[in-house]
Image (cartoon, rainbow, N blue to C red):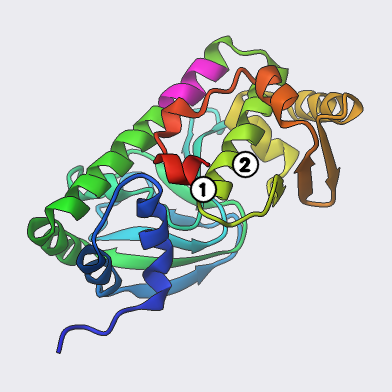
Amino acid sequence: MGPTPSPELNGLVRKLATIAQLSGDDERAILALPARLKTFDEDNDLVREGQRPMECCLILEGLVGRYKVLGRGQRQIMSLHLPGDIPDLVSLELPVMDHNLGTLTPVRAAFLPHAALRELIAARPAVAGAFWRDSLIDAAIVREWLAGIGRRTARQRIAHLLCELCVRLRALRLIVDRIFELPVTQAELGDALGLSTVHVNRVLQDLRRDNLIVSQGRTLKILDWDRLRLAGDFDPTYLHLRRTAAL
């Protein structure tokens, strides 16, 4: 008998299914990975810059940000990561972390040993291809964010990010319609988009006033998808979702 499948890893299977096609045997091999489970409060690091991890971190619940801290203590969040993401998958090939992964909410994570992941990749070419595709899409998201910070207005940046989160969450079947939790502070949005907290607040008010979104507490609802997409200059091509996931 082989290893007992872990239901904790279903999120990884679901995430990979949005970008690649895997067989039932491939999925069962993923579910058989050994996993060390751990919980974190918000504002904690899963992995720090300069570390040499021997495991990869799979997000099970919560929201994680990839970030760097500059010389004067300024933080730049470079991407947001959802359940099913392995944001440090590159540590399989790049032994020293060159950025931090920090929790923006309470997080449950599964740590997967590098050795087990390498065995899986060697034995399952389709899984290797899915992980490779996932890493390429991760880089595509960073490129899109870079273009946004460099050339989009504050309104476009915020509208674009809201569209991205909605599409990614819908692909994972974590939300219904276009209503989702936005559990980040305005300061954290500013760190992600290169804006001041005051500027973020002003733009969110404008989007509400224009009846593009409505929010109550941490719950946000997109009222007019087409207008918000146009406001954010949003084209989901860079997410490279399979058609079934995109729909």
**Where is residue 190 drawn, in percent x and y?**
67, 31
> Which amino acid does the dot numbered 1 rest on?
Ala
Q: At 36% across and 35% down in the image, what residue appears?
A: 137
- From what the image shows, is residue 220 above or below residue 112? above
**Where is residue 177 drawn, in percent x and y?**
69, 48
Q: At 77% across and 45% down in the image, what residue appears?
A: 220
Q: Which residue is mark 1?
A: 171
Which residue lies most toward the right here? Answer: 209
Along the viewing direction, whichever of 226 and 29 lies nearer the viewer: 226
Quadrant location of the N terminus in the rendered image: bottom left
**Where is residue 243 drawn, in percent x and y?**
43, 39
- Of the numbered discs 2 and 1, the one sitting upstream in the chain is 2
- From what the image shows, is residue 120 above or below residue 138? below
Along the viewing direction, whichever of 206 and 231 lies nearer the viewer: 231
**Where is residue 163 drawn, in percent x and y?**
63, 33
Q: Give the SS element for disc 2.
A: helix
Tell me where the magenta segment starts and ends, as one range: 142-148
Q: Which residue is mark 2?
A: 166
